Image (cartoon, rainbow, N blue to C red):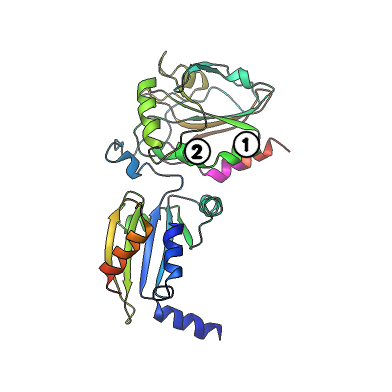
Amino acid sequence: MTTTKHFSLKWMLGLLVIFIWVSAASGQSPDFKENIYPVGKLKPRDSVLKVKVGELAPDFTLPAVRGGKVTLSQYRGKKNVVLSFVPAAWTPVCSGQWPGYNIAQEFFDQNDAILLGISVDNIPTLYAWTRQMCMGGGKLWFPVLSDFWPHGGVAQKYGILRSDGVSERALFVIDKKGIIRYIDVHDINERPRLEVLVGELEKLNK
Amino acid sequence: MNELYQAIEKRKDLKDKMKIIGIGTGNTNFEVDFFRKKYEVPFPLFSDEGYTIHKTMGEVRTPYFIGVRLKGDGSTEVFYSKLGGFSDPKEFLNSMVKLSGI
């Protein structure tokens, strides 16, 4: 009976609309139009990490796109922190990673975590880029910080500044005591899987 | 997209003849499932983490829509292929119906 029903539906069906989208985009959203610079395939990793899981995360203060400055230690005792370093504005993978985190805010909230997005671009560049990310409406819920000057200073401190002056695509999960609990210096060409980060955030509460 | 789905389902002449599927380019099953639940997507969504489908489709930017006519002999024909979303689901549906000749 089921087979017959399935068969008839198959033959009655005349049209299929295929909708291709990116929920945690790859930087190919029409929001960016033709503005994404094609970087090509890069060396997956080009730096030597200077911090380890279990260590106190090096403190820093950086200017935020939304104004003012953000200091890592201001969250001590209050929030878990995820540092998301991306290599550069207006490049393919980076332009998708943060919009993905933007729609996944609940995973951060559920685990009492704040996300700090960091790149070595200057504030005006980050301002234009993050505004373009949200052309469809809304805005980023997390602070975006500029590690432009001294150039890549924080990335250097963590050991993720590449030889060409951009940072690695890296994630650091830091608990409320300021201790690094997870590090992912990811292949720069690929976007980290959301579920891995969510799993690491959930571990903080166990 | 959900409104487009509802508009199709409400039309008796289209309900069993026109279906939508979504493909999450570069997304994992977890990400697609999260997206489906968050936005209460009523039609099937598939993940394309390895960009296999994306490459087959010509590495298009997103969102991208492809209208496919399924012929009685099992063959297929693309009647619509375009980048970008739409603001009026009913208008989009009407253009799909017109272009497909369904």
Depth check, front residue: A18 or A42: A18
* Sequence order check, earlier mark of 1 and 2: 2
Q: Which residues are magenta?
A: A186-198
* Residue annotated with mark 1: A109
Co-location on one chain, circles 1 and 2: yes
Subunit bearing disc 2: A
Question: In the rendered structure, which amino acid carries the disc numbered 2?
Answer: Asn
From the viewer's perspective, is A206 left or right of B92?
Answer: right
Name the residue: 37% across, 38% down. A135
* Disc 1, SS: helix
Name the residue: 35% across, 44% down. A29
Residue A187 belongs to the span the image colors magenta: yes
Q: Position of residue B65 (x, y in %)?
A: 33, 58
Asked if residue B75 is positioned above or below residue A30 in the image, the reply reads below
The label shown at residue B97 is none
Q: Position of residue A99 (x, y in %)?
A: 45, 39
Question: In the rendered structure, which amino acid carries the disc numbered 1?
Answer: Asp
Name the residue: 45% across, 79% down. A9
The label shown at residue A102 is 2
Residue reaching furthest to the top = A150
Name the residue: 60% across, 26% down. A52
Residue A200 belongs to the span the image colors magenta: no
Residue reaching furthest to the right = A206
Q: Position of residue A57 (x, y in %)?
A: 60, 21
Q: Position of residue A3 (x, y in %)?
A: 52, 83
Res B12 → quadrant:
bottom left
* Distance from Cα at disc 1 to Cα at disc 2: 12 Å
Q: How many residues crowd around disc 2 within 10 Å: few (fewer than 14), some, or many (20 or more)?
A: many
* Disc 2, SS: helix
* Residue A60 in view (yes/no): yes
State the quadrant of the N terminus of chain B: bottom left
